[in-house]
Amino acid sequence: MKVIGLGQFISNPYKCVTRGVREGFESLGHEFLPVELVESNPIEMQRLIESFKPDLIYVHCLINGHRHNVQDVLDILDGLKSRLKFKLVYHEGDYKKIEDRPRGDLSNIADLVVINQDYELEEHAKLWKVKKCLAMPYASFIFKNQPKVNPVHASNIAWIGNGNTRDLYKDRNKFFEEFSKEVPVDMIVEKLGKESFKVAPDIYASSKFCISYDCISNTMFFSSDRPFIITGAGGLCLARRTKGLDKILIDKKHILFFDTTDEALSLYRQYSKNPTLSNSIRKDAFDYVQKYHSWNNRCSDIIEILKDKKDKFTFLYKEIYDNKYKKSKD
């Protein structure tokens, strides 16, 4: 199958979706072409799609305000789809982002819309007039073996994320301020800039602890990509508890959840004194996430859903456990 990734797949190739989607489809044996949208223009996009003749297009980061207008892109995709007959997946991302994203009829374009949380899926489907609008958590990059520690990128406790003073991030900023009074946090982006995202798995694998702090905690299955990228690289993830994430990754088996700064510090003290237990969690998390929560899994599910062989993504621990049990009985 021939797949196009349409978005920041060239200008920002190391982020979770741009790197992950490419890895996922290529790991399944499909030919993948990255097509730039944000730093390019719709005319060049159209030329590349017509030349490649894809079976599937995965659209991400379709946002007004870059070098394209959303409606212009949608109109081009509509015309191309009617001629080339490809399937199209539209990845909406985080529903509370402030950018101007599509809010109209996508029925002629999108065969599947995926959102990174289980939030008003039926309402979203009605908004876009699409039949399939599903929750799909982020995923891990693909590794055959647990990455080795690289002393160059080792930290005691690492955080990779952009600093932001918007009100949405005030709780996160307060957390880091309070936590760092006792345990200084290595703010990787301040040191390495955009290079941080390129070497993120190396940093996560090499650091003693890695922090994931999501500012939105009360939306079912909403999470940033960090818990998956950290655990999938063999890192020890200290994560703020968000609604439903503990049904995907299990506390003290794959990840360490906290609700308050004091709880985070207590977990840090406990596990920094017990490297054997910490390494056991790292290993269990790496094996589990690579087997069930890599981009190989998400892309495989996408193909099965488009073929009507599945009706949703498989990501809940209980579903995975039940499936394993059923197969062992069979």
Image (cartoon, rainbow, N blue to C red):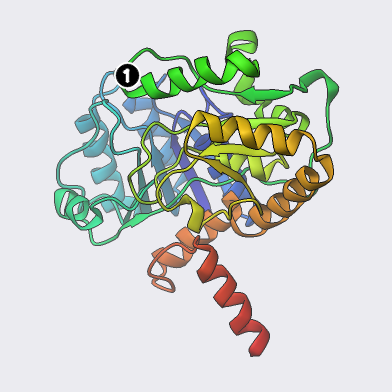
Front position in the image: 73 or 50 = 73
User: Amino acid type of disc 1?
Assistant: His
Above-or-below relation of 243 to 172: below
Asked if residue 220 lies left or right of residue 190, the reply is left
Q: Foreground: 298 or 306?
A: 298
Residue in the picture at 67% in, 59% down? 291
Q: Is residue 128 left or right of residue 114?
A: left
Q: Quadrant of the C terminus?
A: bottom right
Q: What is the x, y in percent for residue 247?
A: 49, 58
Residue at 83%, 26% in the rendered image:
150
Give 101 or 210, whichever is nearer the viewer: 210
The image quarter in which residue 164 lies: top left
Would you say 238 lies left or right of 97 here?
right
Residue 289 location (% of width, % of height): 64, 53
**195 left or right, relative to 310:** right
Q: Name the element at disc 1.
A: loop
Furthest residue toward top: 191
Per the image, the residue denoted by label 1 is 66
Using the rendered image of the protein, determine whether residue 88 is visible from the camera's viewpoint: yes
Q: Give the camera-side residue of 67 and 286.
A: 286
User: Is residue 187 in view?
Assistant: no
| Tally of marks | 1
Q: Looking at the image, which residue sits at the far bottom?
A: 330
Give residue 315's position: percent from left, percent from top.
50, 60
The local crowd at label 1, few if under 14, some if 14 to 19, many if 20 or more residues have their Cα within 10 Å, is some
> Picture coordinates of residue 285 (x, y %)?
68, 51
Residue 74, picture quadrant: top left
Residue at screen point 32% across, 32% down: 62
The residue located at (15%, 42%) in the rendering is 104
